Protein backbone atom coordinates (compact mmCIF):
# COMPACT_ATOMS: atom_id res chain seq x y z
CA UNK A 1 0.00 0.00 0.00
CA UNK A 2 1.50 3.30 -1.12
CA UNK A 3 0.24 6.66 0.14
CA UNK A 4 1.02 10.16 -1.09
CA UNK A 5 0.41 13.20 1.13
CA UNK A 6 0.25 16.73 -0.28
CA UNK A 7 0.13 19.85 1.87
CA UNK A 8 -1.37 22.75 -0.09
CA UNK A 9 0.51 25.95 0.71
CA UNK A 10 0.62 29.31 -1.05
CA UNK A 11 4.09 30.62 -1.91
CA UNK A 12 5.03 33.17 0.75
CA UNK A 13 2.68 31.76 3.41
CA UNK A 14 5.67 30.76 5.50
CA UNK A 15 3.99 30.96 8.91
CA UNK A 16 1.21 28.59 7.89
CA UNK A 17 3.75 26.20 6.34
CA UNK A 18 5.90 26.25 9.47
CA UNK A 19 2.90 25.52 11.71
CA UNK A 20 1.61 22.63 9.59
CA UNK A 21 5.12 21.22 9.13
CA UNK A 22 5.83 21.22 12.86
CA UNK A 23 2.57 19.41 13.61
CA UNK A 24 3.05 16.75 10.93
CA UNK A 25 6.69 16.19 11.86
CA UNK A 26 5.67 15.77 15.50
CA UNK A 27 3.27 13.05 14.36
CA UNK A 28 5.95 11.49 12.17
CA UNK A 29 3.83 11.80 9.02
CA UNK A 30 5.81 12.55 5.81
CA UNK A 31 4.36 14.90 3.23
CA UNK A 32 5.18 16.88 0.10
CA UNK A 33 4.50 20.60 -0.04
CA UNK A 34 2.17 21.39 -2.94
CA UNK A 35 2.47 24.96 -4.22
CA UNK A 36 -1.06 26.38 -4.23
CA UNK A 37 -2.47 28.10 -7.29
CA UNK A 38 -2.18 31.85 -6.70
CA UNK A 39 -5.13 33.65 -8.24
CA UNK A 40 -4.58 36.99 -6.53
CA UNK A 41 -4.86 40.01 -8.79
CA UNK A 42 -6.23 38.08 -11.77
CA UNK A 43 -9.41 38.90 -13.63
CA UNK A 44 -12.07 36.18 -13.59
CA UNK A 45 -11.72 35.93 -17.38
CA UNK A 46 -8.16 34.67 -16.90
CA UNK A 47 -9.41 31.49 -15.22
CA UNK A 48 -10.01 29.40 -18.34
CA UNK A 49 -11.85 26.58 -16.52
CA UNK A 50 -14.27 28.98 -14.80
CA UNK A 51 -17.82 29.57 -16.09
CA UNK A 52 -19.14 32.73 -14.43
CA UNK A 53 -22.58 32.49 -16.07
CA UNK A 54 -23.04 29.01 -14.65
CA UNK A 55 -21.84 30.18 -11.22
CA UNK A 56 -24.43 32.94 -11.27
CA UNK A 57 -27.11 30.43 -12.28
CA UNK A 58 -26.23 27.96 -9.51
CA UNK A 59 -25.02 30.26 -6.74
CA UNK A 60 -26.49 33.64 -7.53
CA UNK A 61 -22.97 35.11 -7.31
CA UNK A 62 -19.50 34.98 -8.81
CA UNK A 63 -16.64 33.03 -7.30
CA UNK A 64 -13.79 35.07 -5.86
CA UNK A 65 -10.14 34.54 -6.66
CA UNK A 66 -9.33 32.65 -3.47
CA UNK A 67 -12.12 30.12 -4.18
CA UNK A 68 -10.84 29.59 -7.71
CA UNK A 69 -7.27 29.19 -6.45
CA UNK A 70 -8.40 26.66 -3.85
CA UNK A 71 -10.38 24.67 -6.43
CA UNK A 72 -7.50 24.60 -8.90
CA UNK A 73 -5.08 23.55 -6.16
CA UNK A 74 -7.23 20.56 -5.15
CA UNK A 75 -7.76 19.64 -8.80
CA UNK A 76 -4.01 19.78 -9.50
CA UNK A 77 -3.33 17.58 -6.44
CA UNK A 78 -5.61 14.91 -7.90
CA UNK A 79 -3.89 15.19 -11.28
CA UNK A 80 -0.42 14.87 -9.74
CA UNK A 81 -1.51 11.88 -7.64
CA UNK A 82 -2.72 10.06 -10.75
CA UNK A 83 0.72 10.48 -12.31
CA UNK A 84 2.17 8.37 -9.48
CA UNK A 85 1.71 4.69 -8.68
CA UNK A 86 0.32 5.44 -5.20
CA UNK A 87 -2.89 3.77 -4.03
CA UNK A 88 -4.20 6.61 -1.86
CA UNK A 89 -3.80 10.36 -1.54
CA UNK A 90 -4.01 12.49 1.58
CA UNK A 91 -4.65 16.19 0.84
CA UNK A 92 -4.21 18.70 3.65
CA UNK A 93 -4.62 22.45 3.54
CA UNK A 94 -2.04 24.43 5.50
CA UNK A 95 -4.69 25.98 7.77
CA UNK A 96 -4.92 22.84 9.90
CA UNK A 97 -4.77 21.79 13.48
CA UNK A 98 -3.54 18.20 13.54
CA UNK A 99 -5.43 16.41 16.30
CA UNK A 100 -3.97 13.82 18.73
CA UNK A 101 -3.38 10.31 17.37
CA UNK A 102 -3.49 11.57 13.77
CA UNK A 103 -0.86 9.11 12.54
CA UNK A 104 -2.28 6.14 14.46
CA UNK A 105 -5.84 6.84 13.32
CA UNK A 106 -4.92 7.50 9.69
CA UNK A 107 -2.82 4.33 9.47
CA UNK A 108 -5.70 2.34 10.97
CA UNK A 109 -8.12 3.88 8.48
CA UNK A 110 -5.87 3.17 5.50
CA UNK A 111 -5.31 -0.42 6.60
CA UNK A 112 -9.05 -1.01 6.98
CA UNK A 113 -9.89 0.52 3.60
CA UNK A 114 -7.11 -1.41 1.88
CA UNK A 115 -8.40 -4.65 3.36
CA UNK A 116 -12.03 -3.94 2.42
CA UNK A 117 -11.98 -3.37 -1.32
CA UNK A 118 -15.70 -4.05 -1.44
CA UNK A 119 -16.30 -0.54 -0.09
CA UNK A 120 -17.05 1.58 -3.15
CA UNK A 121 -15.77 4.99 -2.08
CA UNK A 122 -14.16 8.08 -3.58
CA UNK A 123 -13.23 10.44 -0.71
CA UNK A 124 -13.01 10.31 3.09
CA UNK A 125 -13.55 13.62 4.88
CA UNK A 126 -11.18 13.65 7.85
CA UNK A 127 -12.31 17.04 9.18
CA UNK A 128 -16.09 16.78 9.56
CA UNK A 129 -17.61 19.31 11.95
CA UNK A 130 -20.84 17.34 12.30
CA UNK A 131 -22.19 13.94 11.40
CA UNK A 132 -25.41 14.26 9.38
CA UNK A 133 -27.41 11.70 7.39
CA UNK A 134 -24.71 9.09 7.92
CA UNK A 135 -24.50 5.35 8.44
CA UNK A 136 -21.78 3.75 10.56
CA UNK A 137 -19.50 1.23 8.87
CA UNK A 138 -17.14 0.24 11.68
CA UNK A 139 -16.05 1.39 15.13
CA UNK A 140 -12.28 1.51 15.36
CA UNK A 141 -9.87 2.34 18.14
CA UNK A 142 -10.34 6.07 18.61
CA UNK A 143 -12.84 6.83 15.86
CA UNK A 144 -15.60 5.39 13.73
CA UNK A 145 -15.88 5.26 9.96
CA UNK A 146 -19.19 6.05 8.30
CA UNK A 147 -20.95 6.56 5.00
CA UNK A 148 -21.16 10.36 4.75
CA UNK A 149 -24.26 10.50 2.59
CA UNK A 150 -24.56 14.24 3.28
CA UNK A 151 -20.90 14.95 2.63
CA UNK A 152 -19.33 17.39 5.14
CA UNK A 153 -18.42 20.80 3.81
CA UNK A 154 -14.89 21.09 5.24
CA UNK A 155 -12.08 20.33 2.80
CA UNK A 156 -9.00 20.86 4.98
CA UNK A 157 -8.30 17.12 5.30
CA UNK A 158 -9.27 14.60 2.60
CA UNK A 159 -8.29 11.03 1.75
CA UNK A 160 -8.72 10.00 -1.89
CA UNK A 161 -8.94 6.65 -3.62
CA UNK A 162 -7.54 6.47 -7.15
CA UNK A 163 -11.04 5.94 -8.55
CA UNK A 164 -12.26 9.04 -6.72
CA UNK A 165 -9.40 11.16 -8.03
CA UNK A 166 -9.99 9.88 -11.57
CA UNK A 167 -13.66 10.84 -11.39
CA UNK A 168 -12.88 14.28 -9.93
CA UNK A 169 -10.39 15.02 -12.71
CA UNK A 170 -12.92 13.86 -15.30
CA UNK A 171 -16.06 15.54 -13.94
CA UNK A 172 -14.66 18.55 -12.12
CA UNK A 173 -12.69 20.24 -14.88
CA UNK A 174 -15.19 23.06 -15.37
CA UNK A 175 -15.52 25.32 -12.33
CA UNK A 176 -18.78 26.93 -11.31
CA UNK A 177 -18.91 26.41 -7.51
CA UNK A 178 -16.27 26.45 -4.72
CA UNK A 179 -14.48 23.13 -4.36
CA UNK A 180 -16.09 22.25 -1.01
CA UNK A 181 -19.56 22.78 -2.49
CA UNK A 182 -18.58 20.69 -5.51
CA UNK A 183 -17.52 17.84 -3.23
CA UNK A 184 -20.69 18.08 -1.16
CA UNK A 185 -23.01 18.08 -4.16
CA UNK A 186 -21.10 15.43 -6.12
CA UNK A 187 -20.63 13.00 -3.22
CA UNK A 188 -24.10 13.48 -1.75
CA UNK A 189 -25.52 12.61 -5.17
CA UNK A 190 -23.39 9.50 -5.82
CA UNK A 191 -23.17 8.32 -2.19
CA UNK A 192 -19.45 7.55 -2.43
CA UNK A 193 -18.24 9.83 0.34
CA UNK A 194 -17.05 8.56 3.74
CA UNK A 195 -16.29 10.34 6.99
CA UNK A 196 -14.62 9.78 10.34
CA UNK A 197 -15.68 10.84 13.80
CA UNK A 198 -13.91 12.17 15.76
CA UNK A 199 -12.07 14.14 13.06
CA UNK A 200 -8.33 13.73 12.47
CA UNK A 201 -7.75 17.42 11.65
CA UNK A 202 -9.68 20.66 11.88
CA UNK A 203 -9.22 24.25 10.68
CA UNK A 204 -6.74 26.20 12.77
CA UNK A 205 -8.69 29.43 12.29
CA UNK A 206 -5.82 31.37 10.72
CA UNK A 207 -6.65 34.43 8.62
CA UNK A 208 -6.59 33.70 4.90
CA UNK A 209 -3.55 35.18 3.17
CA UNK A 210 -5.62 35.60 0.02
CA UNK A 211 -8.81 36.99 1.53
CA UNK A 212 -6.69 39.36 3.55
CA UNK A 213 -5.83 41.26 0.39
CA UNK A 214 -9.53 41.80 -0.23
CA UNK A 215 -10.01 43.20 3.25
CA UNK A 216 -6.97 45.44 2.83
CA UNK A 217 -8.57 46.98 -0.24
CA UNK A 218 -11.62 47.90 1.79
CA UNK A 219 -13.85 45.59 -0.28
CA UNK A 220 -16.37 43.35 1.45
CA UNK A 221 -16.65 39.73 0.41
CA UNK A 222 -20.28 40.31 -0.54
CA UNK A 223 -19.25 43.09 -2.94
CA UNK A 224 -16.50 40.94 -4.42
CA UNK A 225 -18.91 38.07 -5.05
CA UNK A 226 -21.51 40.27 -6.77
CA UNK A 227 -24.42 38.48 -5.10
CA UNK A 228 -27.79 38.60 -6.83
CA UNK A 229 -31.12 38.87 -5.01
CA UNK A 230 -31.59 35.12 -5.53
CA UNK A 231 -28.37 34.13 -3.75
CA UNK A 232 -30.07 33.07 -0.50
CA UNK A 233 -32.82 31.11 -2.25
CA UNK A 234 -30.31 29.25 -4.40
CA UNK A 235 -28.25 28.36 -1.34
CA UNK A 236 -31.31 26.82 0.31
CA UNK A 237 -32.19 24.97 -2.89
CA UNK A 238 -28.72 23.38 -3.06
CA UNK A 239 -28.84 22.38 0.58
CA UNK A 240 -32.22 20.65 0.27
CA UNK A 241 -31.25 19.00 -3.01
CA UNK A 242 -28.13 17.50 -1.44
CA UNK A 243 -30.04 16.41 1.67
CA UNK A 244 -32.65 14.77 -0.57
CA UNK A 245 -29.95 12.72 -2.34
CA UNK A 246 -28.38 11.86 1.02
CA UNK A 247 -31.70 10.71 2.45
CA UNK A 248 -32.30 8.48 -0.58
CA UNK A 249 -28.94 6.76 -0.05
CA UNK A 250 -29.55 6.43 3.67
CA UNK A 251 -32.98 4.84 3.20
CA UNK A 252 -31.68 2.52 0.46
CA UNK A 253 -28.86 1.32 2.73
CA UNK A 254 -31.23 0.03 5.43
Image: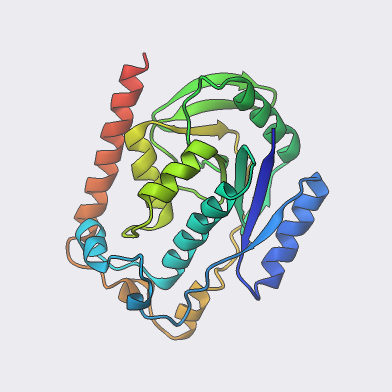
Q: Is residue 123 visible?
A: no
Tell me which corner region of the image, top left, top right, bottom left or bottom right, holds residue 93. Answer: bottom right
Quarter of the figure with the C terminus:
top left
Residue 85's x, y, as percent?
Answer: 64, 42
Residue drawn at (49%, 32%), measured in percent from left and top? 194
Q: Is residue 222 visible?
A: yes
Quarter of the figure with the N terminus:
top right
- Position of residue 237 in the picture relative to residue 152 (left or right): left
Please name whichever residue, 162 or 175, is drawn nearer the observer in this view of the structure. 162
Residue drawn at (46%, 69%), measured in percent from left and top? 66
State the scheme by which the image is colored.
rainbow
- Position of residue 57 in the picture relative to residue 248 (left or right): left
Total tally of numbered discs in the picture: 0
- Position of residue 14 in the picture relative to residue 188 (left or right): right
Residue drawn at (60%, 34%), measured in percent from left and top? 198
The residue lying furthest to the top in this view is 254
Residue 33's x, y, as percent?
Answer: 68, 60
Q: Is residue 254 above or below residue 146?
A: above
Please name whichever residue, 17 or 211, is drawn nearer the observer in this view of the structure. 17
Residue 203's x, y, as percent?
Answer: 58, 53
Residue drawn at (39%, 48%), measured in percent from left and top? 170
Residue 52's x, y, as percent?
Answer: 27, 68
Q: Is residue 169 above or below residue 125?
A: below
The residue lying furthest to the left in this view is 229
Amino acid sequence: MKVETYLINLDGSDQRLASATAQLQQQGWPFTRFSAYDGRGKALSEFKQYDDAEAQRILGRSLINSELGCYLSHYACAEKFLETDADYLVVLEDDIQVLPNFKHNLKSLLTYLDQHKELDWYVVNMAAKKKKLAKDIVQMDGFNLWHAYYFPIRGVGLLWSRKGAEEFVKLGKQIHVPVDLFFQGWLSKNGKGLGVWQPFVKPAGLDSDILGTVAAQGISRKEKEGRSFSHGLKKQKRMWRDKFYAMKHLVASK
